[in-house]
């Protein structure tokens, strides 16, 4: 099981996260590409930091929504969405090339990521966008109960997939993330995050908002970099892993 974190989400003089401290404890860095957060210099510094610690670099494209941090739903036509994803991935790909590191995967951000978990047409559009860049570039998606359907769609679009679970988010009974507008959608306790990581590792399960137990088969576990307990949570998760 791998551990990933959203990084490079500062913007100009505005700071976000603790990338310098968190990077040594993760396997994968999902680096913002300038649409929901980040800018060219921050992207470059974050790639360099990942290279320093031997961390795999992933593109973290989102909706063009700096004010809303990419967490607001947007209605975007498929052709435009495909271009938006490819534009952002291409930008980070160029920076990676300049630093002599590879771009290893793509993980969409925020509202785009969550909408993909409900909308198979949007998921197919993003798969097509990634596959047109490289047929060997994996797309990271949420590990939902409909795993076989996603694998079939990925095969149709000739794109590898990585399945992701979340350490610091509350799940719905349907296997999606509880909306952030809802109370307790984000785990604010390091102990609760640790408990969820243990459940994912030992049994491949999480407890949902209704108290039901959900089977989750994942390749990587995410801890959000903007969580106030991110550093402590990442350290505990790394110790467990």
Image (cartoon, grey):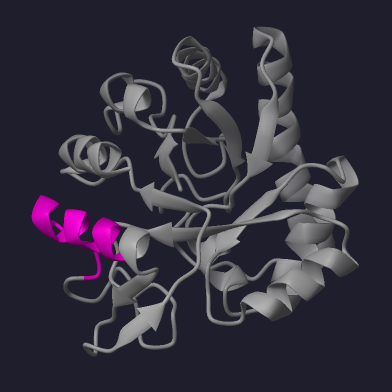
Count up the numbered dots: 0
Q: Main secondary structure of the magenta part?
A: helix
Q: Which residues are magenta?
A: 185-199
Q: Is residue 60 magenta?
A: no
Q: Point out residue 150 in the picture as x, y percentages from the top left corner.
A: 70, 73
Q: Is residue 114 above or below residue 241?
A: below
Please tell me in which quadrant of the rendered image residue 123 appears. Answer: bottom right
Q: Is residue 47 left or right of residue 229?
A: right
Q: Nearer the viewer, residue 71 or 241?
A: 241
Residue in the image at 44% along x and 80% along y: 175
Residue in the image at 44% along x and 29% along y: 8
Residue in the image at 41% along x and 52% along y: 221
Q: Nearer the viewer, residue 155 or 5?
A: 155
Q: Point out residue 138 in the picture as x, y percentages from the top left corner.
A: 71, 47
Residue in the image at 77% along x and 59% along y: 127
Q: Point out residue 5 in the picture as x, y percentages from the top left corner.
A: 40, 40
Please tell me in which quadrant of the rendered image residue 170 appears. Answer: bottom left
Q: Is residue 196 magenta?
A: yes
């Amino acid at each position: 099981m791998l551990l990933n974190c959203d990084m490079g989400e500062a913007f100009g003089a505005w700071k976000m996260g603790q990338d310098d401290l968190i990077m040594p404890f993760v396997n994968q860095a999902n680096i913002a590409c300038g649409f929901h957060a980040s800018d060219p210099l921050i992207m470059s510094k974050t790639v360099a930091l990942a290279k320093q610690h031997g961390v795999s670099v992933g593109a973290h494209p989102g909706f063009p929504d700096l004010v809303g941090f990419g967490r607001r739903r947007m209605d975007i036509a498929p052709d435009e969405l495909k271009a938006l994803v490819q534009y952002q991935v291409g930008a980070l790909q160029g920076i990676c090339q300049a630093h002599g590191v590879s771009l290893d995967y793509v993980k969409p951000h925020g509202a785009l990521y969550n909408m993909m978990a409900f909308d198979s047409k949007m998921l197919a559009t993003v798969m097509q966008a990634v596959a047109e860049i490289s047929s060997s570039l994996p797309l990271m998606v949420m590990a939902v109960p409909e795993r076989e359907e996603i694998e079939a769609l990925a095969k149709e679009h000739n794109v590898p997939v990585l399945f992701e679970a979340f350490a610091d988010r509350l799940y719905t009974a349907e296997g999606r993330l509880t909306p952030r507008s809802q109370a307790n959608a984000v785990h604010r306790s390091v102990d609760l995050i640790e408990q969820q990581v243990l459940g994912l590792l030992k049994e491949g399960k999480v407890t949902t908002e209704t108290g039901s137990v959900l089977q989750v088969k994942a390749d990587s576990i995410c801890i959000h970099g903007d969580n106030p307990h991110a550093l402590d949570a990442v350290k505990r998760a790394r110790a467990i892993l």
